[in-house]
Amino acid sequence: MEKYVVIGNPIRHSLSPAMQNRIFQELGMNAEYNSVLIEEDTFEAEVKKLMDSGVRGFNITTPFKERILPFLDELEDLAAASGAVNTVLRKDGKWYGFNTDGKGYLEGLEEIRSITKDDSILITGAGGASKAIYLALKSHTDAKITVANRTTEKAIEMTKDNDNHHAMTLEQAEKELADFTIIIQTTSIGLEASKNKSPISLSNLTKGTICSDIIYNPAETAFLKEAKKNGAITQNGLPMFVNQGALAFEIWTGIKPERSLMKEAVLEQLGGN
């Protein structure tokens, strides 16, 4: 049996096993997918143990998308450019790293509407997922992009090579919020440990702004609740989650999975939300 896992901390919220196992079962494949909690202070030892266990591939979620890099033999271009990996494949004795977050996110965002050069996009957070989304947007649109982070060093590094891209603090972003047409929340704020918190106040939001959170569980974070209250068009992380998972499945198996079945499996776990 082929074994796949997702690693992270926290990991209890992850519905990747339900989603990927649904497709394995549908296709009649002799494979299983599980979640593995890895402690931050013993990451190196636990990852080595995992990679020696016979696993064929795995996903990486917060906070290990950057820490996994030294353990891999080769990176595809987007993973190398973003400095973050969310999908790993073992092939011919080597470990290959990929990043499906950016493409998966972009496909989901454009379910709402196409992005145009007239958009002004704010990304909150400057971690691994943020980098992948930023690079996907950068290659896809000439729209103005601003990255806001609690400290600006990472945001400055991300945006330094483009005159139409900018970095600022979250406090600055709050003051200028009315200028943005799309706001993308990429931090882990809103997960179980901080489910009543939002990384940014949305009191200055312009009605009709698209507000997107990459978190899908809970289905509506504090960020999205406030956005909806202020008249925004909202989207949680479910489209990105399904899309990035489908892209990972294809990397592992060479098969394009039925995304509607993957979404159905996740929604069943979320209680139909």
Image (spheres, rainbow, N blue to C red):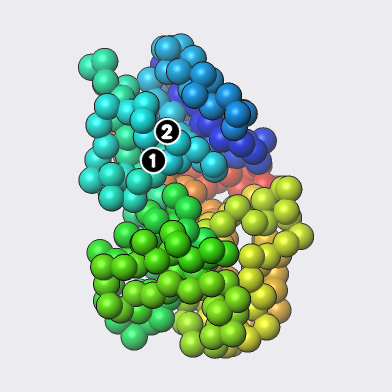
Q: Which of marks 1 and 2 is nearer the N terminus?
A: 2
User: Disc 1 on helix, strand or loop?
Assistant: loop
Q: Residues within 10 Å of mark 1 (few under 14, many from 20)?
A: many
Please give the residue where the numbered disc 1 appears in the rendered image.
Answer: 85
- Answer left or right for 250 relative to 243: left
Please give the residue where the numbered disc 2 appears in the rendered image.
Answer: 68
* In the image, residue 1 above or below residue 215: above
Q: Residue at x 31, y 44 (%)?
A: 79
Q: Residue at x 55, y 79 (%)?
A: 172
Query: Is residue 22 among the parts visible in the rendering?
Result: no
Give residue 142's position: percent from left, percent from top: 27, 76
* In the image, residue 118 above or below residue 214: below
Q: Are marks 1 and 2 in contact (CB under 8 Å)?
A: yes
Query: Is residue 178 among the parts visible in the rendering?
Result: yes
User: Disc 2 on helix, strand or loop?
Assistant: loop
How far apart, in angstroms, are the residues tagged by discs 1 and 2? 7 Å
The three-letter amino acid code for the residue at tag 1 is Val
